[in-house]
C-alpha cells in the first residue's frame, strides 16, 4: 500500500493510498480521513462513502465539507474510487459517462469483457474494509453512505450485509436501478440480459426481502429540484417498499436542492450525526 | 448580467453570473452566495473572496465549506474570476500557470499586450462591488479575503481602500510579491521593469505606509507545511512591517497544514467570524 498524498484538515488527516486489488485485478486508489483522536489505543468507527457517476475518491473529500463534524464525532471516512482503473480495464466503447470507467455501479460483473476487473461489489464490501481494518486504527463498527450511483451502492452493500454495517444513508440514490435508464444500461452491460439476476443489486428488491430481525436503519435525503429525480432516482419506489415491509427508512425530501455536492454539503453533518448514533 | 447557474446550499443560494466588464473589456464570470435572510428589507454585508493561481470563481465555492457559517451569520460571499478570459485575451506565451490566464495578480497592467484586459485591480475594487450593490440585496459593509495570489490581492485591495473595507483576511498570502519569484515574474510582465512602480501592489510596502487613522484590521493564517512558504509567501516580512508600524495584524502559523483548500476549509469559519465582528 503506497501513500499518494496527505493533507492535514480540521485537526485530522486526509490521506490517499494506492494498492493492488485482489478483486478488481488493478491498482485502486482510495482516500481516508482520520480524525485526530484515532490511534491504536482508541480505534474509531468508519463511515464508507461511495461516490456517484464520473467520480473518483476525490470528489467527496474535496467538496462535502464533512471533516469538521467527523473530527468532532471521532469518525473515520473512507472513500474508494467508483470503478476499476487502468489502460487494460475495459471501458464503454462509446466512452459514455454512465457505463465503464467511473461507473462501476458497485456490482460484480459477470459479462465479458467487464467481468475481469469490474468486481466493485466485492471490493467495497469485503476487500477494502479488511484492508482498512488491518492498516489503520479503526474499529469494526462500520456505516455506509453514498450519493446517486453511490447511494445505490450504499443501500445495496448495506442491505446485503446487515451484520456488517450498523447504519446506511444515501443522498439522491438510484433507488430502483432495475427500473431506470442508468440502471438498465449498467446492469445489462455488467450482468447480462436476464433481469431476474439484476434484483440482487436492486435496493427496493433487497429491502422488500430483508429479514425482520436484521434491519439496518436507513436515512435517505433527496432534493426536489434534482434534474434526475423522476427518471433515474425514484425514491418513491423505495418508500413504497419500506412501507410495505415496515422497514425503518427515514426519507426526507428537500425543496429547492439539486443533485450536486452543494446539496450534500448542506446535510452531510446530519448524516454524520445519524451514523454516530449507531457506530459510536 | 446573465445567470449561468444556481444551486440551493445550506439554506441560501449559490449563483453564477456572466457580465461584460468595462475594465477588463471581456465577459467576466463571478459567483455569489446569498444567505437565506438576504432580502431588500434586510440587506446583508458582503465578503469578497479572491482566489489563487489557476483558480476561477468556482474553487472557493466548491471546496471551502463556508456556506453553513455564512448563512448563520447572514453574510453574502462574492468570488470573482482570477483574470480576464477569452480567446482575444493575451496569455503567457509559455502558457505557464503563474502568469496570464488564471494569474491576473489583481493589478492594473501597464505593459502591452496585457494592459488592454488585465485591469483586475479596478475590476475587483470598483466595478464588481458597484455591480453587486446595484443588483443584490446587500449593504455597503464590505470585507475582503483571499488565498495565496488572492491573499495578496485581498491585502492590497484592502490596504489601498481603507475607507471601503472594514476587515481583511488572508490564507497563505503572497505577502511580499516584490521579493519573491511569483511576484517578480508577474509584476515584470504586467507593470514593467521599474521596480519602484511595483510597490503600489506590495502588501508590506502598503502596510508600512498606511495612515495611522485609517487602519483596517487584518487576520492572516499560514500553514507551516506549505510547500511555498519560504520561497514565495514570506509572512515574516508582513509581520515585520506590521511590528515596525504598529499595525493591527493577527498572524497565526498552523503546524502541519499545507497550501491546499483542506487548510482553508479548516479555518474558514474563524475567518467568517472575524469579518462578522467588523461588517455586522
Image: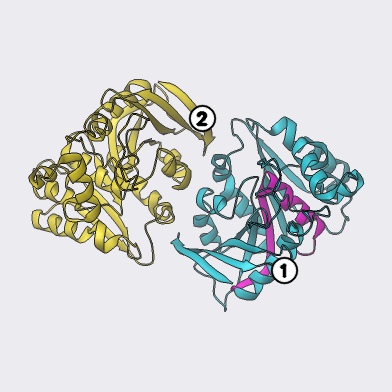
Chain colours: A cyan, B yellow
Q: Left or right of A244: which side holds A169?
A: left
The C terminus of chain A - image quarter: bottom right
Question: Picture coordinates of residue A229 (x, y %)?
Answer: 70, 33
Furthest residue toward front = B93
Q: Is residue A172 above or below residue A79?
A: above
> In which chain is the residue bearing label 2?
B
Residue B257: which quarter of the image? Answer: bottom left
Q: Sort mark 2 into few (<14), some (14-19) or many (20+) by Cα contacts within 10 Å.
A: some
Q: Is residue A89 above or below residue B33?
A: below
Camera sees residue B25: yes
- Residue where numbered disc 2 is placed: B6
Question: Picture coordinates of residue A80 (x, y %)?
Answer: 63, 58
- Residue where numbered disc 1 is placed: A22
Q: Is residue A34 above or below residue B28?
A: below
Closest to the observer: A150 or B279? A150
Q: Which residues are drawn in magenta?
A: A136-164
- Per the model, the C-alpha gap separating discs 2 and 1 is 43 Å
In the image, is residue B197 part of the stretch drawn in magenta? no
Mark 2 or 1: the one toward you: 1
Q: Are marks 2 and 1 in contact (CB under 8 Å)?
A: no
Closest to the observer: B91 or A140? B91
In the image, is residue A159 part of the stretch drawn in magenta? yes
Q: Sort mark 1 into few (<14), some (14-19) or many (20+) by Cα contacts within 10 Å.
A: few
Q: Residue at x 7, y 45 (%)?
A: B196
Amino acid at each position: 500500500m503506497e501513500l499518494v498524498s496527505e493533507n492535514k484538515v480540521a485537526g485530522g488527516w486526509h490521506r490517499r493510498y494506492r494498492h493492488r486489488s485482489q478483486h478488481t485485478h488493478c491498482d485502486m486508489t482510495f482516500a481516508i480521513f482520520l480524525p485526530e483522536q484515532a490511534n491504536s489505543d482508541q480505534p474509531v468507527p468508519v463511515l464508507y462513502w461511495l461516490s456517484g457517476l464520473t467520480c473518483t475518491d476525490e470528489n467527496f473529500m474535496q467538496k462535502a465539507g464533512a471533516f469538521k463534524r467527523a473530527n468532532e464525532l471521532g469518525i473515520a471516512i473512507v472513500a474508494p474510487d467508483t470503478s476499476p482503473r487502468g489502460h487494460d480495464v475495459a471501458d464503454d466503447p462509446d466512452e459514455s459517462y454512465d457505463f465503464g470507467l467511473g461507473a462501476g455501479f458497485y456490482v460484480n460483473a459477470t459479462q465479458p469483457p467487464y467481468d475481469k476487473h469490474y468486481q466493485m461489489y466485492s471490493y467495497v464490501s469485503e476487500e477494502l474494509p479488511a484492508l482498512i481494518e488491518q492498516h489503520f486504527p479503526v474499529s469494526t463498527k462500520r456505516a455506509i453512505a453514498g450519493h446517486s450511483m453511490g447511494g445505490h451502492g450504499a443501500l445495496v452493500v448495506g442491505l446485503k450485509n446487515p451484520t456488517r454495517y450498523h447504519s446506511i444513508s444515501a443522498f439522491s440514490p438510484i433507488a430502483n436501478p432495475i427500473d431506470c435508464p442508468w440502471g438498465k444500461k449498467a446492469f445489462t452491460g455488467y450482468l447480462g440480459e436476464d433481469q431476474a439476476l439484476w434484483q440482487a443489486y436492486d435496493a427496493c428488491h433487497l429491502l422488500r426481502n430483508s429479514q425482520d430481525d436484521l434491519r439496518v436503519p436507513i436515512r435517505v435525503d433527496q432534493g426536489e429540484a434534482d434534474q434526475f429525480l423522476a427518471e433515474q432516482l425514484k425514491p418513491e419506489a423505495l418508500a413504497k417498499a419500506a412501507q410495505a415491509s415496515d422497514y425503518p427508512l427515514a426519507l426526507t425530501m428537500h425543496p429547492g436542492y439539486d443533485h450536486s455536492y452543494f446539496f450534500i454539503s448542506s446535510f452531510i453533518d446530519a448524516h454524520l450525526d445519524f451514523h454516530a448514533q449507531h457506530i459510536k
